[in-house]
Structures are given as structure tokens and as C-alpha cells.
Image (cartoon, helix red, strand yellow):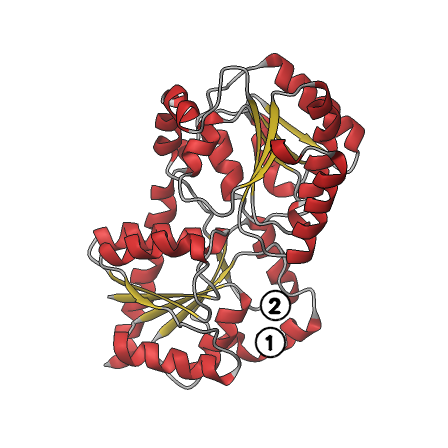
Amino acid sequence: MKVLHLVLKPRFSGAEILVRDLAIAHSSQGLKVGIASFQPPDDDFIPVIENLSSLGVILFLPKRPLKKFSRVIGLWNFAEKFSPDIIVAHSVIPTIYARIAFFNKRIPKIISVLHAVDDFRAWKLRLPEYILSRRSDKVVAVSNETAQNYVKKFPKIKVDVIQNGINTRKFVIAVENRAKYRERFGLSDSNIIVLQVGRIATVKQQHLSLEAMLPIMRNNQDVELWFVGPVEEKSYYDYLLDKIKSYDIRNRVRFWGGQDNLEEFFSVSDLFLMPSIREASGIAFLEALASGVPVIASDIPPFAFAKEYPGVWLVSPEDVGDFSSRIQQVLDEKKRYKRDLSLYDFKHTSDQYLSLFKEVHVNAKGCSN
């Protein structure tokens, strides 16, 4: 069985991290796995691409961005070289083009994966979905909320929910080596690291973390705020830089870009913040839980399950005063927590996708007879 994952752009974001992990897991189980994109990878993602290639994953990545009909041609070329049985299109744009490119073909089968909370609020995206949705052989959502929002608009389409998972053991082991990693980062015992992981974008609300941390950083020169994630919105990034400059805390706020060693960042941190407006399935949130670091996040439905875990506070980060007080309280306590994340181990996610591929592949072979 040959499976081709299609993404818009290889980068450090939820969909692409899922694809990376599925490709590694399924390649080791004997599947022929390929990854294709419409845009070149981000520079900081290139080491991930090189590692995937060394593991036998076949890559179809353009040197320049493909636009409009060139995306369809690109898909035809990818398919001619790889002959996939299944194309797994991650997010809306890859899904639209995969359906167009193979609209009248029975093979490859197409699986659409919904990664956002609600991609179809805008009618411009709903219209092609009405027209092309029948070309998807399966539709997968990464959360129940994502599935519910989709079914409200397209009630005739069945949606399978496969929640994202993580390599929980990797984060536990990293915490056991916290002292080693803190030394590697050049941190002293007195340094306090507050971490936020996610794309630099308004939906992630890094500005609220910044505003809530300001009084704390003014009162304690050992506190640092670290942002890990690629810059998605340049104007928002510039806005954050201006804020940092005006607050005169440039030497204690760091932007690390995308990183493939997040377990190390979580192990050295003392608090994790995630004040997002919305999330479909926050992988970084799960990683923080697995690492045992205290977590303060938005009180939104995808995070509600975490109320059962110790050391998790769900708040309204727009109330910056309350957000800041909670941060200070947690930092004063200086605790780390043991949490059982076995239900969210990536093996469950990988096995579910593999079962889905096998189911679809059986149908594909039936069509080819």
C-alpha cells in the first residue's frame, strides 16, 4: 500500500507534525509513504525533511510555491512518480486541489483530514466543499468539536474522529534529564522559564502572555518568556517586537522559531502558557501535560478534558490582571506534576490511521478489479 500525505507547506504546525509522525511510524511498519506539498518547507523544518528522507519517506517538495492550476499539475506529476493508492489531504486547500486533480478517478482514494476548529465558516470555502465533498472517500476530524462543526454544515457526510497523540515517553524522559538540558541552555538554578509553543499568530494570542508577564518580569529579573513556533503573521510578530521594545524587556523575551526538540524546552521550563482563542487539537498542550509542567491555558472546549489533571488552570486570558495573578501564584509554588497521558499516546493515533488506510485500500483494490 502506498500512502501520499499532502500538505500546504512543511513547517512546525499541528498538521505537519502529525504527518511527520505518521510517516515515521507507518514507514517502520512496511508502508510506502510519501509527503508532497504546494510550497517549499520552512528553513527551520529542513532538518525534519532530511531525517524523513533518510528513513525512506519519499518527498515531493517544490523549490518554488505552486499556485492555482500549477498545483493540479504538480499533483498529477507526484501521482505519476509515486502511484499512490491513497492521498491523505491535510486541511482545506490541499483537500480541494486533491479532489479537483483526481475528480474522475477511482484511484487514488482520497482521505480529507480537518485540522482546524471550523474551516467552513466562510461561504467561499463552503461552496467548493458542497461540490467536491463526494470525491472524498473518508473525512477525518482531529477533534469532536471539529467534527460537530463540519456535520452542522454538511449533515450527509460521515466524519471519523481520530484525535492527535504524542510520544508521551519522550517527554517523561526529558524531564528526568532536566538538569542536563538546563545546563545546555545556559540556565542557572535561579532562572525561571515561562514557555509558550505555537505559531506566531493572533489566534495564539502571544500578546496576552506578554502583557500578563510584564509585571512579573519587572519584579523578578530572573524570569524569562520564551516563544517557540514559526512566524505565520509577520505584522503580528512586528507588533509583539514593538511591545517588547516599549516594555524594555528585550533581553528576557526570546523567539526560538520552530523547534524539533520540544521535549527539551518543556523539561527546562517552569510554566507553560496557551491563551489561544481556539484550537482544534493542541498537540503542544498534550506535550506540556506529559512533561508535568504547570499549565495555564484558555478555557475553551478542546482543553476541558485537562481539568481532571493536577496543575492545570483554565482561565480567560483576556482578563490580563487575573491571568497575571494566576501566573505569579503558580511560579511561587514551584511544583511539577505527574499525569497519566497514556490515553493520548501516539500509538493509538497511528494505529487508527493505519486501520483507516487498510479499510480504504480494500475498497481501492475492489475498484481496480
Tell me which amino acid carries mark 2.
Answer: Phe
Tell me which amino acid carries mark 1.
Answer: Tyr
| Marks 2 and 1 in Cβ contact (< 8 Å) | yes
Residue under the point 46% across and 69% down: 39
Residue 340 pos. (x, y %): 44, 26
Instruction: Give whichever of discs 2 and 1 has the lower sequence position.
Output: 1
Q: Is residue 50 left or right of residue 125?
A: left
Residue 273 pos. (x, y %): 61, 33
Task: Please indicate, yes or no, whether residue 175 appears anywhere in the rendered image.
Answer: no
Q: Is residue 22 left or right of residue 94?
A: left
Location of residue 56 with respect to 177 vertically, above or below:
below
Location of residue 344 with respect to 189 vertically, above or below:
below
Location of residue 106 with respect to 122 vertically, above or below:
below
Q: Which mark is residue 130?
A: 1
Residue placed furthest toward the top: 333
Label 1 crowd bin: few (<14), some (14–19), many (20+), radius 10 Å: few
- Quadrant hosting residue 63: bottom left
**Residue corresponding to mark 2:** 154
Q: Quadrant of the C terminus?
A: bottom left
- Element at badge 2? loop
- Element at badge 1? helix
Task: Please indicate, yes or no, whether residue 359 appears anywhere in the rendered image.
Answer: yes
